[in-house]
Image (cartoon, rainbow, N blue to C red):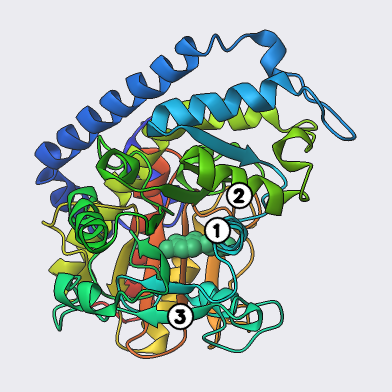
Amino acid sequence: MAVNDIDDIYASLGISSRVLNICEDVLGGLDERFREIDRTSEYCQLKVLKAFQKNNVNESCLLGTSGYGYNDIGRDTLEKVYSDYFHTQDCLVRPQITCGTHALALALMSNLRPGDELLSAVGKPYDTLEEVIGIRPSKGSLAEYGITYAQADLNPDGTPSLDNIRNAITPKTRLVTIQRSKGYQTRPSLSVETIGKIIETVKSVRSDIICMVDNCYGEFVERIEPTDVGADMVVGSLIKNPGGGLAQVGGYIAGTCECIENVSYRLTAPGLGREVGPSLEALPRMYQGFFMGPVVAASALKSAIFAATLYERYGFESYPSASEERHDIIQAITFGKPEGLIAFCEGIQAAAPVDSQYAPEPWDMPGYDSKVIMAAGAFVSGSSIELSADGPLREPYTAYFQGGLTWPHGKFGIIKSFQTLVDKGLILC
Ligand SMILES: *Cc1c(COP(=O)(O)O)cnc(C)c1O
């Protein structure tokens, strides 16, 4: 027996030769797409490297501080690296920022004052922000502080409506939030170019309105970032793209001096600002994760395109569709019934390096208004740059798939999910 045969190792991991053949056939048509992804990844990798070198990242930057964290050279230098990557005046990147929602809440709460209005330019924002804003009543929300909310609805096809945005701006509008990624919706994710058009529209009404972009899942997918097209702030999570799978916690907010200064006083305390905040032991992984980010994002993108192409072939609708250009790493696949969504997530979980022996169960996750199923056998708890899938248990039973630290693992995860649906009789092939 040829022990180094690739079919044999797939077979030993539960993949039938029939399923493997189908998958390899699908992949045969994706060479050109993958080459394009590698080119973007190459570009972003060099952009990151340039930012490291410009700021003279050196060995002492990898040492952390404790306590107040005064004069934390590693932390301050990393923030300069991020600023240079995003072409912004300033940035905060901290392990004290717990997640993407926390980073977004900080950016909003620090830059809005009672009487101001927040406008979402692209319809309903991400689920967890509903409580931050107070769309769903919540303790500590912006609404409790007298900050009102308005929303520019999308066009019927899910694209942003510049007219609706223009019409929704009032003298009270202080900040416009633009969510790049679709989140748990089936609208298209936004290209950086489209984000630029939204910002241009807002600024043409009043140039002092702050334009903030929720950049979650978008980093390194295109050669430019929203701050290259006029965003005053971009916000994201380090357990997504910019952490490269290595950062164990953290968030970033990059933007203008004024916006970031406001954030710094909300992050710690008025008067203290950015001067405090120890980096503890977090810096080596934060630096290395950002360095690895472009290649990891490329693995995730390839996995997403492979999944879309494979499942579309068997009649499942995917967003974005297999052939569409990508603006984030999320792939939505619609199963139409709970069994399909659950089987898909079970397959992803079974492909994991950690916790593959467990099956995911739908649960009432804080911040979400319906049960959510999550498959994540991750090194970092909840990390969604690692191979993961999740979705709310509601119509139309869409799985949101993302991540994959390496392309071979992302590929295997998709094959395993497909095999699971085949084994359960949900796909006939
Ligand atoms: C992930 C995500 C967030 C933040 O979620 P956390 O789980 O708090 O990190 C916000 N907006 C979008 C679009 C996201 O994808």
Quadrant the C terminus occupies: bottom left
Amino acid tagged 3: Tyr
- What label sits on residue 23 in the rendered view? none
Task: Locate residue 209, reporting x and y percent.
Answer: 37, 59
Task: Locate residue 80, reporting x and y percent.
Answer: 53, 25
Q: Which residue ends up furthest to the front in the rendered image?
A: 171
- Which tag, 1 or 3, sits closer to the chain's start? 1
Residue 353 sits above or below residue 323 on the image: above
Task: Locate residue 121, reporting x and y percent.
Answer: 31, 70
- Which tag, 2 or 3, sits closer to the chain's start? 3
Asked whether disc 1 touches disc 2, contact meaning CB atoms under 8 Å apart, the reply is yes
Q: Secondary structure at mark 2?
A: helix
Amino acid tagged 1: Asn
Task: Locate residue 418, reporting x and y percent.
Answer: 33, 65
Quadrant the N terminus occupies: top left
Q: Secondary structure at mark 3?
A: strand
Q: Which residue is mark 1?
A: 111
Q: Which residue is mark 2?
A: 262
Query: Taking 24 as reference, is 420 left or right?
Result: right
Judge the density around disc 2: few (<14), some (14-19), many (≥20) Cα neighbours within 10 Å.
Answer: many
- Which tag, 1 or 2, sits closer to the chain's start? 1
Q: Which residue is mark 3?
A: 149
Q: Quadrant of residue 114?
A: bottom right
Residue at 43% x, 46% y: name it.
404
Amino acid tagged 2: Asn
Judge the density around disc 3: few (<14), some (14-19), many (≥20) Cα neighbours within 10 Å.
Answer: some
